[in-house]
Every structure is written in structure tokens, then in C-alpha cells.
Amino acid sequence: MAMASRKLLLLPCLVLLFVAAAAALVEAAQPQSTYIVHLAPDHPALSLTPARGGRNALLGPLLGLPRRLSAPRPRLLYTYARAATGVAARLTDAQAAHVAAQPGVLAVHRDQARQLHTTHTPEFLHLNGDGVNVISLSVGSTYAADFYEDSIAIGAFGAVKKGIVVSASAGNSGPGEYTASNIAPWILTVGASTVDREFPADAVLGDGSVYGGVSLYAGEPLNSTKPLVYAADCGSRLCLIGKLDKDKVAGKIVLCERGVNARVEKGAAVGKAGGIGMILANTEESGEELIADPHLIPSTMVGQKFGDKIRQYVKIDPSPTATIVFHGTVIGKSPSAPRVASFSSRGPNSRAAEILKPDVTAPGVNILAAWTGEASPTDLDIDPRRVPFNIISGTSMSCPHVSGLAALLRQAHPEWSPAAVKSALMTTAYNLDNSGEIIKDLATGDQSTPFVRGAGHVDPNSALDPGLVYDADTSDYIGFLCALGYTPSQIAVFTRDGSVADCSEKPARSGDLNYPAFAAVLSSYKDSVTYHRVVRNVGGDAGAVYEAKVESPAGVDATVTPAKLVFDEEHRSLAYEITLAASGNPVIVDGKYSFGSVTWSDGKHNVTSPIAVTWPESAGAASM
């Protein structure tokens, strides 16, 4: 009887042991993801260093993980101590959720993939944080997260706190609205535009029509006309590899459409099918943007309008023919420059509607630079060529231009803050191309707007002597975050000093940040908003007198008070306010946005800030 009792008692114990073991196995099998754990500066986990394979027995306990969450063991990947304080670690979702609630943990975010805003991965320079004046970031996301969840915004805040200018690419997700990334106000956000250098290659049709395009093809030219076919009639309008009918393509020039696969890869697909040339036509998405590529076969790229005409020619001519004529490098005023690239990401700002983004544009289309011998000029595996220099496009090309200018400004004015450097570049930027017209948007062929070009194209010589600057520091940015409605715990991710943000005296609105641009979102056609600004005289004349000139956006009465700023030795900084009042007449508003500017001038300096107004129909988009 006693033996039977012991067996009966042993059975539930074995069941419990089996259940516990099974639960442990299930828990250990939970997948891990990479998380960024933001920690207070005195957190003990910051003293850890990654071991081989990332295994560190102390990480879990130091992060406050209980025994039930100890498996699988967390892996320490990296420790951050400068721009941010925290660790990168491999955790399960359950572990991350538990860690987020522990004392000294400011925030826990799943690592977000970032894309390089260019066509090739650059080699990192391995700079350390000592003595750095400018950080150039040609990386970003296709989605702009809230600032307190954006690792670049958080790290950039820490850099700016140390007096470092952070210049970042806006992204290559244009031409859609709300596509700009790296849009925190303490970041200098750069879009891409063209220069006055072209690589023309004409598509000459059998009927004598000549349609201009661009190309970097450097091989043997065609030298004669060849039969011309439309790729859609040959199995693949996009010229995908392996999808073209060889019987229809062999010995012919093929008209391909842009999209899906790489531009140069389309030519490779034509060549693989037996074709001897390619005319690459833009669709509506890319408009008239032309990017010169080092094609593998004789090829040229034409804009949407020319592409439509060539397509129509192929359709109506019984025996269409063409050739491609290459003209090398041409520098001149036709076409006009700069023009904003279609791929350049645009505003409005999806996270802070009253902060205009991008800030400026700079050369980012068909830019010549040194190239690694480890990759082909097209960065495609099918391309066997190797070159010491290459020409590529992207906001990754424009960002370093502005980073270099920021370095020059810091050298000339070492006392300037990052905000002052940004202000100088923005308020002196120009908005007219070399033909005297408003800078055009290659996506539409029409005039660009401040949501496309920001404050304009950078002008380094003028930026050296801007006259006035709009300054700001991290305390102003904390006030801005308060105005956005961020909680003290969310703001603590930026401050990292154990302090609790006091938002009791926050600015009335986020647009009151001392920013060198204005972006208003009006709730009705009778709404009005007033913004406050402070400018500092950095010109050579301490007694300068500046007067305001306002170009009101359509449907808006813009008023600056006072309209005159009189500086002296004791009053180097002066305040003003601008009121943007809807006129109450929606009929005169053409579209969902209106644009204008305010310029302060002393006769020598022109300090210009763009004004962008979003009308009620589109106001909801800013909350996306």
C-alpha cells in the first residue's frame, strides 16, 4: 500500500517536471531580435563588453531579467556611451518587454533596418568622437518613426548637444509627399539636385526625330540605324532578365520602361536576349528625371514625354528604326540647373508638421567620385568591369556636399552652434536656376516648392556671411518635444542625464522653435497662427538695421512685427513675430498648399526664410 502511494505521488511530480521542462524548452526556442536598449548613464550594464559570440552571463541579470526569462540567454552586441547611452542586444519579445519596465531603462526599441541613400555601400572611415565637428549621415529609413523611436534622431541629439553638426540625407523615396527621412529639427536634412553638367545621348528615329537623353556608355557606338521594337511587344515592357523573346529582340534596339529592376540590368536583359541597344523611357513616376548610367550595351535614358513619343512612333510606323548618338560630357545652361531630382524625398514633415523639411538641396545627380575596385561601376554581379572613378546619384551624394560646407563654416566661425550653421546655409540658399527661373522639379517639370527644395540650393559663399542667424540649443529642442506632446519618459531618451523634463512652460506650439523656416497647418480658411523668432546679428556692422519684406502665400495675409530690427552693441539679438492669417477666401487658393517667404535685408545681406501653408483638406496627412 505504501509503495502504491509513493507511485501515485511520484506521477504528478513527474508530470509537473515534464511540463516545466517543456515550458523551458518552448521559452528557450523563442526567436531573438536585435533591440536597442537606451539606459541611464549610470546603469551597470554599460560596463559590459561583448564577449565572443555575444554571450555575457551578466547581461540578463543586469537588465533585470527574472529566471523565467533567462532563456535563451541575451546576447550583447554593442555598448554605446557617447551620442547615446545603452546597449544593442539580442532579446526575445518577452525579454524586451520586461526590460523596458525596469529602473534605469529609458526605452527599448527593436532595431530598424536602414538603407544607404546611394547606389553603393561606402567604406566607413572609423572616426572616433574626439574632435569631430561634423557628422555626415547618408543613411536613413523609408519610414520616419517618432523621434523618440528613431535611433538616428536620438544619436544626432546627443551629437548636437556636444556642438557637432549632423548632416543627413533626406532619402531617395521621392517624388511622393511625406517621404523625407531624418526630419528632426536638430538634423540638417539634404535633398538632391542636378548640376550644369550633362552626358547627352540622343535617340535618333528613322523619321528624323531626335530625342535627347543621357548615358555613360563608353563602348563601341552603333554607327548606323537598327530596327526598333517596344519591349512590351517582346514579352516584358520592363525588360526583366529572361523574359524577353529572343526571336523578337535579336539584332534590334529595344524600348524599355523604367521600374522594378535596375536600369543597367534592363540593358543586360536586352543584350542577353540578343538585342544590340536600349532606349530606357521614364514613366510618370520619374517624369523628366534623367540619370546617366554606365550601361553594358549602347543605351540612353529619355524622359516620360520623349518616351511616349518614341512609343507612339513604334506603334504607327510599319518598320521603325533608330540609332543612338553619344556626345560625351557637355557643360552649359541647357538644360537649366539646378533642378530637384525626382527621387529626392520630400515634405511635408510627417512627424512635426510645423518644421519644414528638407532643409536645403545640393548636387546629388550624376556626381563623379572615387570608386572601389571591389565592385563594378553598376554594383551588379553581372558587370565584370572595374573602374577607379564612377558617376552615381542619390541624396547620399548631396549630403556630403553640405557636410563639407558645414565644416568650412565651422572653421570660419568656430563659435557658431550647429543651429547657427544650419541657419546660415538655409537663409542664404538660392531658389533661382541658372536661367533665372524658379528651380524646377524633375518629377513634374514644373516649379519646385519648399516641400521639395527646402529653403533652396546651398550657396557656400553667401553662407560665410549670412548677416543674421536663428540659433537654438538642446533646451529649445526639449521645449519643442514638449510642444509635440512627448512624455517625460520619452524625452528622457534624449536628455539621458536623469533629469525629468519640465513641460509646464512649453512653447505654445512646436512651430515656435527658433527655426529658419515657417510651416503652418491651418485648420480653416479663417484660421491664423503666430510664430515667434529671435535673430542674432553676426554681420560686421553692429549697428545694422534690417527691414522685412514679406511675400505672402496665396490666401494668406502675412504680417511681421516689428517690420524693422535695429541692432546695436548691447542688442545683438532681437525678437520678432510673424502672423499668418487666412484671408477667408478658399477660391484664391490653388491646391492644398501655399508658399511665400520673409526676407530681412540691411542692403547687403538678404536673410530669407520660406513659408509653407497647408490647407484643411490635407491637414490630416501630417498625422500619418
Image (cartoon, helix red, strand yellow):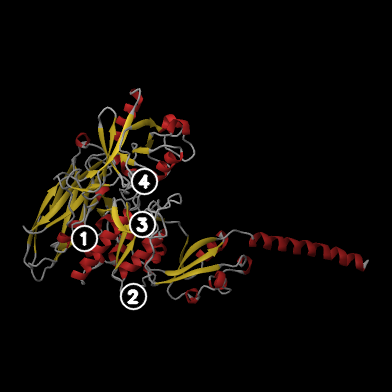
Residue 129 on image: x %, y % = 35, 73
Residue at x 32%, y 63% (from the top left corner): 136
Residue 124 on image: x %, y % = 38, 65
Name the N-terminal-most of marks 1 and 3: 3
Report whether 260 appears left or right of 289: right
Residue 241 makes an appearance in the image = yes
Q: What is the three-letter code of the residue carrying label 4?
A: His
Residue that badge 3 annotates: 387
Q: In this picture, is 360 found above or below 61?
A: above
Residue that badge 4 annotates: 295
Residue that badge 2 annotates: 130
Q: In this picture, is 302 found above or below 94?
A: above
Mark nearest the camera among 2 and 3 is 3
Q: Determine whether label 2 and label 3 are within 8 Å by CB.
A: no
Name the N-terminal-most of marks 2 and 3: 2
Instruction: Give how far apart the Cα atoms at labels 2 and 1 are.
Output: 25 Å
Residue 610 on image: x %, y % = 20, 51
Q: Nearer the viewer, residue 193 or 211?
A: 211
Mark nearest the camera among 4 and 1 is 4
Instruction: Give how far apart the Cα atoms at labels 1 and 3 are.
Output: 39 Å
Instruction: Give how far apart the Cα atoms at labels 4 and 1 are.
Output: 41 Å
Q: Which mark is residue 224?
A: none
Residue at x 44%, y 76% (from the top left corner): 42
Mark nearest the camera among 1 and 3 is 3
Q: What is the three-letter code of the residue carrying label 2?
A: Asp
Instruction: Give how far apart the Cα atoms at labels 3 and 4 are.
Output: 14 Å
Name the N-terminal-most of marks 4 and 2: 2
Residue that badge 1 annotates: 423
